[in-house]
Amino acid sequence: MRRLPILTGILVAALALALAAGPAAAQTLKVGMVTDMGGVDDKSFNQGSWEGIVRAIRELGIHGRYLESQQQSDYARNILEFIEQDYDLIVTVGFLLGDATLHYAKQFPDQKFAIVDYSYDPPVENIRDILFATDEAAFLAGYLAAGMTQTGVVGTFGGIALPTVTIFMDGFEAGVKYYNQVKGTNVQVLGWNAKTEQGLFAGNFESTDDGRRLAEALMDEGADIIMPVAGPVGLGAAAAAQERGAMIIGVDSDWYLTAPEFGDVILTSVVKKMDQAVFDVIQSVADGTFTGGLYWGTLAMGAVDIAPFHEFEDDVPDWLKEELEQVRQGIISGEIDIDAILYS
């Protein structure tokens, strides 16, 4: 299957500037994005969010720009730069930007914000919180992994123990547990236990060496399918899996498209459509309907899902594909209670 090229951060930035540089640029909506430390081309949540802005540049004629955060102290500086330049909407990406975003939202109540992977309780009037029910899609991935493992052992690990990371791991563990309940099997999950909240974490979202190390540790214990929830760290896991014949489940975006060099080991990916969510928020600013509060992307609305099997399409048996569709419908209808399965 032909693999699609991915725009690098540099090319995308050039596109944004070029499209926003026309004579009417001063009157166009200005949207700025502050990345987390993984960078705009992280093949994960930063890149997915930026692609929503790129779409808005193309379809809505906005001006879009991003500022990359190299360290946590950059968050406030980058947000303030967009405020000082009178941007209409500031999109911050990642759980770690929650405090800085709230600080400036309170200080500048007329400034509109959106934040990916964070929410506030109570809601903040000028912040649109973008969260996803990634446990629903990860449940499908766990069920798939349990049906595909040859060793009876699968694994997962995270970047940092944040709620937006562990929700993937919860869903994955629950999907494996449900498969065991249905099939009478005993597939093991390494790297995460929701009941004890104990698991494997790299402690960062940048080091591919850490990803390789954690994946090798899981494979040494028998795992032949691994789901890293760690941004670019996961690419190190994919490289290790490629060397040792294991399979990888990507997260956030379809890794077969964003990291095609690992296509031969990518079974599927747990996808959350950050691009669509960010585009929708920009559209609401453009048409005057922006409100603060929660955007909750679910399996039922198509905001989360698992990606196609690509090179593994012929390896996934028809019975498993049919059962995955039944599981999908069970989650959507509420017949399958993920939390009840996870903590049973």
Image (cartoon, rainbow, N blue to C red):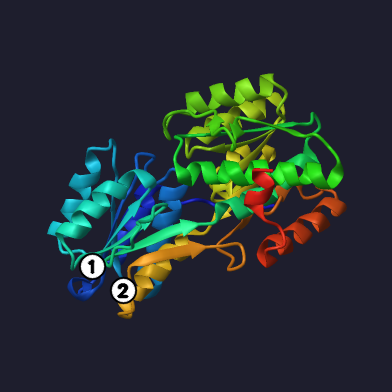
- Residue at 48 percent across and 40 percent down: it is 231
Task: Tell me the distance, in whole angstroms, between the alpha carbons under discs 2 and 1.
Answer: 8 Å
Please report contact status of discs 2 and 1: CB closer than 8 Å, yes or no.
Answer: yes
Q: On residue 242, which mark appears?
A: none
Q: Residue furthest left?
A: 84
Residue 55 shows in this picture: no
Image height of 200 relative to 248, above or below:
above
- Where disc 2 sits, the SS reads helix
Which mark, by number, is residue 285?
2
Question: Residue 89: horizontal and vertical position, in percent?
Answer: 27, 65
Q: Is residue 9 visible?
A: yes
The three-letter code of the residue at mark 2 reads Val
Query: For the residue marked with disc 1, what is the amino acid?
Result: Asp
Along the line of sight, the residue nearer the viewer: 123 or 319 = 123
Residue 246, horizontal then vertical, whole percent: 70, 30
Residue 241 shown left or right of residue 281 in the figure: right
The residue drawn where x is 24% and y is 66% is 21
Provide the residue designation for mark 1.
88
Circle 2 packing at 10 Å, graded few (<14), some (14-19), many (20+), is some
Q: Residue at x 81, y 32 (%)?
A: 150
Task: Assign a secondary structure to mark 1.
Answer: loop
Q: Position of residue 307 (x, y in %)?
A: 64, 54
Q: Tell me if mark 1 has few (under 14), some (14-19) or many (20+) residues whose alpha carbon lies within 10 angstroms of its own.
A: many
Question: Can you tell which quarter of the image residue 126 is in?
Answer: bottom left
